[in-house]
Structure formats: C-alpha cells, structure tokens
Image (cartoon, rainbow, N blue to C red):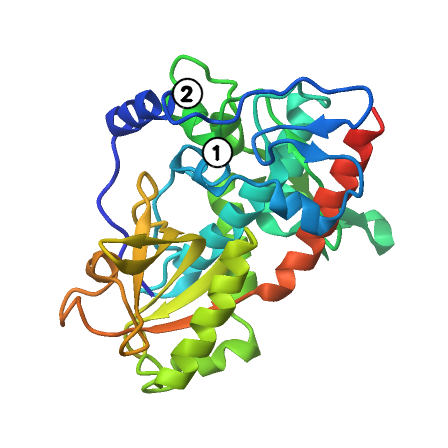
Amino acid sequence: MIAPAASMTKFLSILLLGVCVGVGLQPRAALASSGKTLTDTLVKDLSCRGLSVNSIYAAIQPKSSFHVFYHIPVQNWYFKSGGPNLGVCWGLASVQRKMFYLARFEEQEEISKEELVRRTLNMVRGHELSPLQTGGGRERMLKTPIHSYEVLKYSDLSLLSSWAAEEKVPNGLFPLINKGYKEVVNNESHWKTFKLDVERAQQERFFRGSNLSMVTPAEDNRSAVDNLLTFSTLKKNLEGHRLTLLNLRFGRYDQHVVVAKEITRIDDKIAIIVYDSNSPLQNGVIYYDENTKSFHTPGIYKGVVNEGDPERAIGVYVIDEEERGPIEAAMLRYYQAQCQK
C-alpha cells in the first residue's frame, strides 16, 4: 500500500502551532436571540432559519475548518495483519474526515473524560466493541456497526495541539485516546486505543470483497473520459465543502488513500488540496491537467513509490461516498439541538 515516512518531531508541530495562531481560525460569534446564528470550529454564522444539511455545508470555511491545525498528528504506519506493505492510510483518512465534521474544539465538555474517550474511539473504529452475556454465564466481545454518529465537544484547541503538549498536559485528548483503556472479558484483556482502533477501521475497509477490483492490473492508467468524470465529481463535492476520500493508484499494488479538502489554483494549475497521512503536518497536492485530462502528484508519489517517474499520470478513484449519510445526519441533529438552546 505505502511506505510510512520517517518519524515526526514535536518541535515541528510547535512551530506549526505558532503559525496557526495567525491564520484566523474562527472566533466565537455572539448569538442573537432572534435570527440565531452559530459559529464553532466547523461553521461560521450558520443560520438556524431553514437549517438543513446543505446550509451546514455552505457555512463551512474550508481554509480554516479543514486547516492542518485540525489534522490527525500521527503518520501512517504498517500494521501486523495487513501484510508487509500495507499501511493504515485508508483507516486514517476515514477517521480524519469524521474528525473534521464531528469534532468541535474549544467547547465546554458535557460528559466525563472517560466517556468522551470511549465515544471518540467508537467513532474512530466505526463500530462498538462491547461485552455480551452468553450461555453459561460467559461473556464475549460483540462488534456492532455504528449506524448513527454523534458530534463530540472537546475543550482542547485541536487533536494536534494536545499531541504537541502531552508532556505538560497528560489529560489532553490525544494522550487519553492514544493510551486508551482495556476491558477484561473471560480473563482476556481487550485494549481500545487510537492506533488499534484505526487498524480495526482499516481492516473493515480493506478486507472486503468489493475491493478486489483495486488489485486489477493497469487500473492506474485511466482514460481521459474516466478522469474527466472523476474530476467533475470531485469538483462538485469540494465546491460544496464535501470532503472526499480518494484512492490514488500508482501501480497494481502501490496505492494510497487521502482526503480531498479543497480545489484551487497553484501557478495556473488546478490543484486539489488533500490530507495525506504520510505527511500530516502539511497539505498534500494533486494536480489535474486540463489539457491531457490526467492527474499528477509528484510530492505524494515520492512518499509511496521508491522508483519510477514522480511526474507520471496516476489513477484517482472516489471511494466511500456511502459514509457521508450518517455523518450528515449527525451534523444536522447536533445543530438542530444547538438552535434550540
């Protein structure tokens, strides 16, 4: 899948935090008693009148809401059940999209730290793991898919900030979910931690029959028509502030999953700004060539493939669109409740 990059240092993240102070992350807006509007770390001036999924998306400010400051501060890694070349980029990308939409930072926490950790790891995992009483008075761990997500409030500035400051603030969000907790069932310990639960999320996505097409030959070399259709879908999604998971194919087995955040222009080229788990402290860029109808990403290519031409065209696929519905339903429920306060 990919080769994880070298380990990061927290010195870099501290520098990043210093930069983030000046990027204008959204301040709290006063709420009017009539014509109430809401502002938080995702939306700005969201009107309670005519509240809908579309109006929530319209109130998102991508440059601040999806800023690097809110990236998961952990690099892609190999995991044991994935084979020698399988990282957890797919799991991390899925979790990153959920964190962007479902995490609210700089808020007053409404539940205990222990319960907040439990619910956060459920969101990361995408399913609940809980003891179930069986015959003979024995218990076993039962996996139940989560069909209904929830928005969670955190007092931390961001997951990244709590990671950078964990030595001084050991009860921040990142150190708590990184340490996790265990449940003992039938004298067996079952750990729930951020890394283990990302791996569980990765397994849910990668090891399923519908993914067999991802190892078919020559799928990295797509036609101009296919690429144009993919770009049109991606452009529509991003202009509507709908984060999109992309599977990048550099060859039959060299693949990587990223989160597309924004579409813009860099040096007169169409640029798709992405979260890349190989380099989480900076944005990645995918370029779309309007003339050849092809995608290129030399920067991300170098972090995945050790040989070949980084400038060559790659295959780009939109994936996991079905995950959007439960996330949107959670956002709508949350803001409906906030409007009633």
Which residue shows up at 45% across the image and 73% down it?
230
Helix, strand, or loop for circle 2?
loop
Relative side of 244 to 307, left or right: right
Marks 1 & 2, CB-CB < 8 Å contact: yes
Packing grade of label 2 (10 A; few <14, some 14-19, many >=20) is some
Judging by the rendered image, the residue that carries numbered circle 1 is 178
The answer to which quarter of the image holds residue 321 is: bottom right
Q: Earlier in the sequence, mark 1 or mark 2?
A: 2
Residue 1, percent from left and from top: 34, 66
**Dot in front, 1 or 2:** 2
**Which of 199/106 is in front?**
106
Question: Which quadrant of the figure contains the C terminus?
Answer: top right
Q: Is residue 197 left or right of residue 134?
A: left
Q: Is residue 190 visible?
A: no
Q: Residue at x 52, y 39 (%)?
A: 61
Percent position (x, y) of residue 62? 48, 42
Residue at label 2?
Answer: 166
Q: Nearer the viewer, residue 262 or 135?
A: 262
The amino acid type, in three-letter code, at marker 1 is Asn
- Label 2 is placed on what type of residue? Glu
In this rendering, the answer to whether 156 lies above or below 46 is above
Q: Residues within 10 Å of mark 1 (few under 14, many from 20)?
A: some
